[in-house]
Image: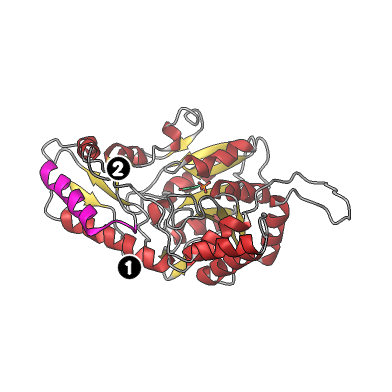
Amino acid sequence: MSQDKIWLSSPHMGGAERDFVKQAFDTNWVAPLGPNVNGFEKDLEDYQGENVHVAALSSGTAAIHLALVQAGVTAGDEVICQSFTFCGTTNPVLYLGATPVMVDSEPDTWNMCPQALKNAIEDRIAKGKKPKAILAVHLYGMPYKVDEIHAFAKAYSIPVIEDSAEALGSSFKGRKCGTFGDYGILSFNGNKIITTSGGGAMVCPTKEVKEKTVFLATQARDNAPHYQHSEIGYNYRLSNISAGIGRGQMQVLDKHIDLRRAMHDFYVDIFKDVSGITVFSEPNEEYYSNHWLSAILVDPEKTNGITREDLRLAFEKENIESRPLWKPMHMQPLYKNYPFYGTGVCEKLFKNGLCLPSGSNLTESDRKRIELVVKKTF
Ligand SMILES: *Cc1c(COP(=O)(O)O)cnc(C)c1O
């Protein structure tokens, strides 16, 4: 393979990141606290709006873990989870010895199906256990059905952990994803829409939740001159070096979202005359996706038998990365014995879906190479 690899989603620096990191070295703030941590949190609070408070953490997975702890989840409890997601959403449920209850997706946003959620809540209550939390995900940056999901959560008084790890910059009815839940989760892993090389955050509706989160993320130290502990703590704070990268990335976030959305438009354009291909798009103008990853569904009955795997292999031959959609958690060996509520919508999405190169740093010549593979395959 002579040509450079085209990645699904790779880090894209804006330029100022190095300056913030250099400043950290110059002032010797090489620690999991410091001006960059505070500055990055402030940037995220301003960006999210709604008077939220943000706690910067070592990963999105850590943020979900601390949200579950604060929702009071302990061993033997049940937590409702969107099955169609990455394992970072659901693994913290197992860290706590709790039971994940998997819920199917609906076809409009590919996210948690409100009807399946309602069925799951009612059936779990009937079986004797009310779920302690709901983990809903804005997958690929597409907002889930916020009104319906939160209405059911409220009706049954169950807190919502809003996994916005893929949806920084997405919004529903003009309000930013990550600000709807009792706890909002962000991730800054290497392949996300912005990166701190690795990191995450909790978006908190109140100052109290933020303070508790920081307390738990710094080993839960009681107020005493010596080290004293009456609760289990964690070492989950973000480093001041990583936060420096984050401050630089915040300067280019909106520009990079425009570029990702342009990649989505590019796919809409090149697939518009190909029958059997659906480009994953917002159901209506209330939804605004950052299009973190562009994705398509391939219907082999309408493509003369060409499958998503045929297309994936055609891309691979040209050194272009593409990837099947997330394999639903209830189909994973680790999770297959937990309850699942739904009709198999996300199983079909997994069978026929493919994520395509979506980075904000793709060039015109990258797009030409992608288009050529599509033209040759169909
Ligand atoms: C990336 C991701 C996470 C976990 O974030 P990390 O920072 O990688 O721990 C959780 N949920 C979803 C949907 C993700 O895509």
Q: Is residue 76 above or below residue 6?
A: above
Q: Residue furthest front?
A: 26
Kind of residue sitting beneath label 2: Glu
Q: Residue at x 34, y 66 (%)?
A: 258
List x then y, in percent, for residue 138: 43, 54
Please, what secondary structure does the residue beneath circle 2 have?
A: loop
Q: Is residue 217 visible?
A: yes
Q: CA distance from mark 2 to mark 1?
A: 30 Å
Q: Can you identify the residue that label 2 sits on?
A: 321
Does 376 appear in magenta?
yes
Please name whichever residue, 227 or 152, is drawn nearer the observer in this view of the structure: 227
Q: Residue at x 11, y 43 (%)?
A: 376
Placement of the N terminus among the 4 image quadrants: top left
Q: Residue at x 53, y 45 (%)?
A: 121
- For the image shown, how many numbered marks are present on the structure? 2
Q: Earlier in the sequence, mark 2 or mark 1?
A: 1
Placement of the C terminus among the 4 image quadrants: top left
Q: Can you identify the residue that label 1 sits on?
A: 285
Q: Residues within 10 Å of mark 1 (few under 14, many from 20)?
A: few
Kind of residue sitting beneath label 1: Glu
Q: Which residues are magenta?
A: 360-378
Does 183 appear in magenta?
no
